[in-house]
Amino acid sequence: TVSYTENGKTVTDSFDVQVEKLDNMPKQDENGAYIINNAAELSTFSVLVNKAGKTDAAAVLKKDITADSDFTPIGGRLSSINIKSKNNGNLSYSAYNYYGGTFDGNGKTITLTLKGTEYLGLFGYTKGAVIKGMTVAGSVNGTGKCIAGLVAYAESGTTKIVSCTNNAAVSGTNNIGGIIGSCGYSAVVEIADCHNTGDINGTGSVGGIAGDISKNTIQNSSNSGSVTGTG
C-alpha cells in the first residue's frame, strides 16, 4: 500500500508484489562470505546482488565452475519496471545495483558462455569492488560496448582487480578488454598481477588488459592474446 499527496489530497493506492524465491542459496562462512561451489549457487549470488540489492556481499569460490548458459553478470541494471496499481496508477522505477563486495576466486576458474548486447562480463557493473585470485575462461560475445572477461564497467569509487587471468575470447564494439572494458569518469581502477591470453576483438578502444579506462594503475600485468580493432 502506498500513500501520497496529489493536489492537496492524500491518495492511498495498492499494488500486487511478487516475491521471488531464491533456490540454491549458497551457505556463508564464519565471516559472512557466500561459499560458491557450483553454477546454480553462482547464479543465485548474481540474483542476490542484482535483484535483492546485496551489492556489498562477499563471496569465495570453492570449485571450478562452468556457468549456466543463462547466467547474468554480477552487478547490473534493473530495467525500468512499470506496475499497474489497483486504481489504475503506475509504479515505475529503475535502478543500478553496482557490485561493491569482495569476490575471492581462491585460485579457481569460471567458464562463461555469455552472449548479449552490452556490459557483459563475469561482473557487469562494479563500484568499489575487490576481485581477486581467479581465472575466467570460455567466451564473452556482445554486439555493443563495454565487454570484458572480468569487469564490463566500473563506476565511481575504486575497483581493485588482483591476480586474475582472462583466457576467454571477448568480442564487441567499443571499450573491449580482457580484464576490464571501461569505467566512469570519477572511477579509479587498480589492476595488479593480471594477465590476458584470450583473443580480444572490437571496433574501437580495444585492449588485452583494458579497453578504455582513465584513472588507473596497471602493475605487473601482461597480454599474450591477439588484439584486433577494426575501427
Image (cartoon, grey):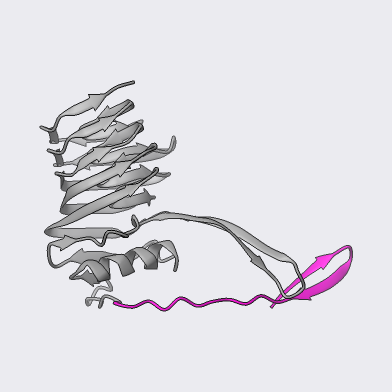
Residue at the image point whose x is 20% and y is 65% from the top:
60
Can you tell which quarter of the image residue 200 is in?
top left
Q: Is residue 197 left or right of residue 142?
A: left
Q: Does any portion of residue 216 appear in the rendered image?
A: no
In magenta segment, residue 11: yes
Give the percent coordinates (x, y) of residue 64: 12, 62
Q: Is residue 77 left or right of residue 150?
A: right
Outermost residue, top direction? 231
Residue at the image point whose x is 25% and y is 59% from the top:
103
Count of labels shown? 0
Q: Does any portion of residue 6 appear in the rendered image?
A: yes
Q: Is residue 25 left or right of residue 64?
A: right
Residue at the image point whose x is 32% and y is 36% from the top:
172
Magenta residues, as a range?
Answer: 1-24
Give the percent coordinates (x, y) of residue 130: 27, 53
In magenta segment, residue 167: no
Give the percent coordinates (x, y) of residue 156: 43, 44
Can you tell which quarter of the image residue 84 is in?
bottom right
Give the percent coordinates (x, y) of residue 57: 34, 65
Q: Is residue 10 above or below residue 120?
A: below
Residue in the foreground of this view, choosing between 98 and 142: 142
Can you tell which quarter of the image residue 45 is in?
bottom left
Residue in the foreground of this view, choosing between 111 and 75: 111
What quarter of the picture does the N terminus occupy? bottom right
What quarter of the picture does the C terminus occupy? top left
Outermost residue, right direction? 8
